[in-house]
Image: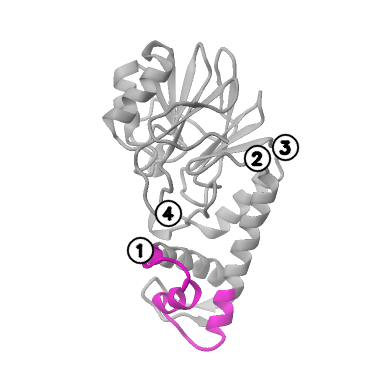
Amino acid sequence: MPVLTPGVPTALSPLVRRITAPNPSPMTGPGTNTYLVGIDEVAVIDPGPDDPGHVEVIIGAATADRIRWVLLTHGHPDHAPAAARLAARTGARICAFGGRHGPSAVDRRLGEGAVLDGTEFRLEALHTPGHAPDHLCFLLGEERILFSGDVVLGGMYSVVSPRRGGDMAAYLATLRRLRSLRLARIAPGHGEVIEEPRRVIDDYLAHRAERERQILEVLARGPARIPDLVAALYADVPPVLHEAAGWQVHAHLRWLRSRGLVRGRDARSRWSAA
């Protein structure tokens, strides 16, 4: 398996290369994965943070005149900001979900089923909300590779944060949809390539179901605030990740409330079993 070394282009298949951005953190893992799809005409998926050095590596790996499109899975700051710099340097078109929930500087808005045809490839956009309202995945038909952005990650679980428009019900529906596809591999926004897509998606679904069960179990003992739930459920998680864990718990609580299983108003409320 190729190593995730920032700044080093790595071939993943005849049509796909990966460059990991130099932005490692507890939330991004080794860094944001940028993918170059195509040879004669290149689509850059998720150019990452606005890091001039990373943009130079992307251009050096593909050459400026071959980069035709910059595709964004979503507008979060670890995936999208370099798009403007890369487009200015290459003349590429920025393609994203756009609109109220996406980046404003978009040349082509992509919705469900939109297709981008390159010389050697065909990418289909799938609207996959849950992690973010504007989230898209891209399916490379020639190789059945799914570029999953932050919906499915390599070696970690995705965060669903209501503060950023995350919605647990939509996220679970997206996971079930992706599980039904015939995928050979998943190329995630963070972490290594996933060689067993269905097994990993099943693990994601099981993990979310188990977290929901745990939340209900704690609330059955009495009302609690989100920090109390985090302390009870994430004792083995480093404290630096507890804020993100709280966002995740809030997303679960909202989903549980929509089904009449818990009561609570917002992130500052005391939540209780219904």
- Which mark lies nearer to you, 4 or 1? 1
Q: CA distance from mark 2 to mark 3?
A: 13 Å
Residue 199, image x, y percentages: 69, 50
Residue 67, image x, y percentages: 42, 17
Q: CA distance from mark 3 to mark 1?
A: 37 Å
The residue that label 3 is drawn on is: 182
The type of residue carrying mark 3 is Arg
The type of residue carrying mark 4 is Gly
The type of residue carrying mark 2 is Glu
Q: Secondary structure at mark 2?
A: loop
The type of residue carrying mark 1 is Val
Write the start and end of the magenta stretch as one range.
214-243
Q: Earlier in the sequence, mark 4 or mark 3?
A: 4
Q: Secondary structure at mark 4?
A: loop
Considering the image in quadrants, where does the C terminus appear? bottom right
- Which mark lies nearer to you, 3 or 1? 1
The residue that label 2 is drawn on is: 195
Q: Residues within 10 Å of mark 1 (few under 14, many from 20)?
A: few
Classify 90 as above or below 135.
above
Q: CA distance from mark 4 to mark 3?
A: 28 Å
The residue that label 1 is drawn on is: 240
The secondary structure that dominates the magenta segment is helix
Q: CA distance from mark 4 to mark 1?
A: 22 Å
